[in-house]
């Protein structure tokens, strides 16, 4: 199996990710992790879920449930350090999603261009 084959994403993986990001709160949480990870006090740039919860008006259990859905979809990873739980973006999974999405768009665009050139 080549490197490119390993980076392909299954249809079920895409569905899980789209479902996870299809919720406004989860999308906001994911974007906060992407944009605020560099401001985290943790040495590896990860955000503590209490830092994330402080950015929202939702309860900690609600934030934790949303984070769990993002984690199960493979968008983020969680790490425990003592009593604190930190989260970070799963870069490899996000790259696979980007590759899958951009590849589909490029393929669609190529088909449209070739159809237009045949018609002209």
Image: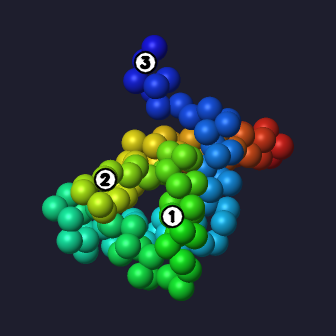
Which circle's residue, 2 or 3, is located before the other in the chain? 3
Query: Is 68 drawn above or below residue 38 in the view shown?
Result: above
> Among all residues in the image, which is located at the extreme right?
119
Which residue is found at the position 34% from the left and 59% from the top? Answer: 85
Q: Judge from the rendering whether residue 50 lies leftward or rightward of residue 66; answer left or right.
A: left
Whether residue 77 is visible: yes
Percent coordinates x, y for residue 36 in the rendering = 34, 73
Q: Residues within 10 Å of mark 3 (few under 14, many from 20)?
A: few
Q: Judge from the rendering whether residue 81 lies leftward or rightward of residue 22; answer left or right.
A: left
Look at the numbered discs 1 and 2 and tell me whether their residues touch, using CB distance below 8 Å: no
Of badges 1 and 3, the one in the foreground is 1
Task: Choose top left, top right, bottom left or bottom right for residue 111.
Answer: top right
Which residue is found at the position 56% from the left and 47% from the top? Answer: 73
Residue denoted by label 3: 2
Q: Judge from the rendering whether residue 113 lies leftward or rightward of residue 84; answer left or right.
A: right
Residue denoted by label 1: 64
Residue denoted by label 2: 80
How many numbered callouts? 3
Task: Choose top left, top right, bottom left or bottom right for residue 35.
Answer: bottom left
Q: CA distance from mark 2 to mark 3?
A: 34 Å
């Amino acid at each position: 199996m080549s490197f490119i084959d390993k980076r392909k994403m299954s249809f079920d993986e895409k569905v899980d990710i789209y479902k996870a990001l299809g919720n406004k709160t989860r999308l906001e949480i994911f974007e906060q992790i992407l944009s605020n990870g560099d401001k985290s006090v943790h040495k590896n740039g990860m955000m503590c879920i209490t830092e994330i919860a402080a950015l929202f008006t939702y309860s900690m259990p609600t934030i934790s449930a949303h984070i769990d859905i993002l984690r199960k979809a493979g968008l983020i990873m969680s790490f425990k350090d003592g009593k604190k739980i930190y989260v970070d973006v799963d870069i490899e999974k996000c790259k696979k999603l980007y590759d899958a999405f951009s590849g589909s768009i490029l393929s669609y665009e190529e088909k449209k261009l070739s159809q237009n050139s045949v018609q002209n």
